[in-house]
């Protein structure tokens, strides 16, 4: 029973530590802790208890997955959720504009370019502020989104670590492709969208893949290639007292779970469920680490959109849907 309890707690590891390491660790400490140490990660498997916890956790997930597809009541609930979630698709442009607008205004106020990782000058900050309010007003959406995309590209050349914020790029690009100005200034005054209707279906995979790539990058770069940088987070917030496993087990487990979530989104498997779990994890992480709201708001918005739309084209979810296999 004790092992089962610890296995449950193991699932809670990412809820407390699913953080962007660069947001909560100062640059100097991060740079000093950089470097691979595969032995450090492998040492988590030297403890038999850790191995048992992982196996019990995997077994528990498989059992829940099986019951979710065989239990009539659960299947009915999932179908109900899917039906109502899909009916909110007309709200997608509004969700993306709100999240991008808040992110841009927040970054501008902090003199940051897109992310807390990259400081900027007053000119760029003013540009971000203007773009943010244009997003909220729904004015000149396609041009505003295009400039936002270009800003991110400039930022990632200045700081490659910004790849961990790729969902920001994906949200702006998706907004360009949606071709729906409602509700907002463009719709009121009758400004026509110039993007081809044929491109509209691409916005879902762009959102899904951008988030998946961002999470996969963070798992590989922060937890696998620079595990001691992630260990700093464990030490700084005394996470071993929250869940009594070793620091290396913390880093290893969070990295694996973050990687799995990222890969699930990349391939579009259980997109709604994965998005809902990631959203819940980020909510707890946001309050636990007291991060700036603008640092994750586009991720909140994009995950909300994926919960509404599902995996879209080029996803395993769409393949299962065509074969009439129950999925959410």
Image: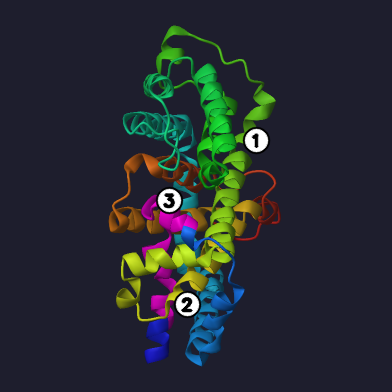
User: What distance separates the C-alpha of mark 1 from that of mark 2?
Assistant: 39 Å
Residue 8 is covered by the magenta coloring: yes
Residue 101 is drawn in which quadrant? top left
Residue 41 shown left or right of residue 289 in the figure: right
In primary-sequence order, the first of circles 3 and 1 is 3
Q: Earlier in the sequence, mark 1 or mark 2?
A: 1
Cα gap from disc 3 to disc 1, whole angstroms = 37 Å
State whether residue 147 is above or below residue 38.
above
Does the segment drawn in magenta span residue 240?
no
Q: Residue at x 59, y 56 (%)?
A: 216
Q: Residue at x 45, y 38 (%)?
A: 118
Above or below for 315 versus 13: above
CB atoms of marks 1 and 2 within 8 Å: no
Secondary structure type for disc 3: helix
What residue range appears in magenta? 7-31
Q: Which mark is residue 268?
A: none
Would you say residue 43 is visible in this rendering?
Answer: yes
Q: Nearer the viewer, residue 43 or 7?
A: 43
Residue closer to the observer: 131 or 222: 222
Callout in the foreground (3, 2)? 3
Residue bearing mark 3? 27
User: In the image, is 236 to the left or to the right of 326?
Assistant: left
Q: Position of residue 166 (x, y in %)?
A: 55, 42
Reading the image, the residue beneath label 2 is: 249
Please identify the dominant SS of the magenta region: helix
| Quarter of the figure with residue 103 | top left
Q: Is disc 1 placed on a helix, strand or loop?
A: helix
Depth check, mark 1 against mark 2: the one in front is 2
* Quarter of the picture holding the N terminus: bottom left
């Amino acid at each position: 029973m004790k092992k089962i309890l610890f296995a449950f707690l193991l699932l809670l590891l990412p809820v407390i530590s699913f953080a962007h390491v660069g947001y909560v660790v100062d640059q100097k400490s991060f740079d000093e802790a950089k470097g691979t140490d595969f032995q450090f990660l492998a040492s988590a498997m030297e403890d038999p208890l850790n191995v048992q916890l992982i196996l019990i956790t995997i077994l528990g997930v498989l059992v829940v997955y099986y019951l979710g597809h065989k239990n009539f009541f659960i299947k009915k609930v999932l179908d109900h959720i899917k039906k109502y979630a899909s009916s909110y698709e007309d709200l997608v442009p509004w969700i993306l504009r709100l999240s991008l607008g808040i992110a841009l205004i927040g970054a501008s106020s902090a003199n940051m370019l897109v992310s807390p990782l990259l400081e900027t000058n007053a000119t760029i900050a003013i540009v971000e502020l203007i773009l943010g309010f244009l997003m909220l007003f729904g004015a000149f959406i396609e041009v505003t989104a295009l400039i936002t995309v270009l800003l991110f590209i400039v930022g990632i050349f200045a700081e490659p670590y910004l790849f961990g914020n790729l969902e920001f790029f994906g949200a702006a690009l998706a907004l360009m492709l949606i071709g729906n100005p409602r509700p907002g200034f463009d719709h009121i005054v009758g400004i026509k969208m110039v993007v081809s209707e044929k491109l509209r279906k691409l916005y879902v995979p762009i959102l899904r893949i951008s988030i998946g790539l961002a999470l996969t990058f963070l798992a590989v770069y922060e937890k696998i290639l620079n595990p001691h940088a992630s260990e700093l987070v464990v030490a700084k917030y005394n996470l071993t007292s929250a869940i009594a496993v070793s620091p290396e087990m913390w880093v290893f487990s969070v990295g694996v779970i973050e990687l799995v979530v990222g890969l699930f989104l990349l391939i579009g498997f259980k997109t709604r469920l994965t998005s809902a779990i990631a959203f819940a994890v980020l909510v707890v992480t946001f309050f636990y680490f007291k991060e700036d709201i603008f640092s994750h708001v586009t991720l909140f918005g994009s995950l909300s959109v994926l919960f509404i739309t599902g995996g879209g084209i080029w996803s395993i979810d769409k393949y299962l849907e065509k074969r009439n296999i129950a999925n959410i």
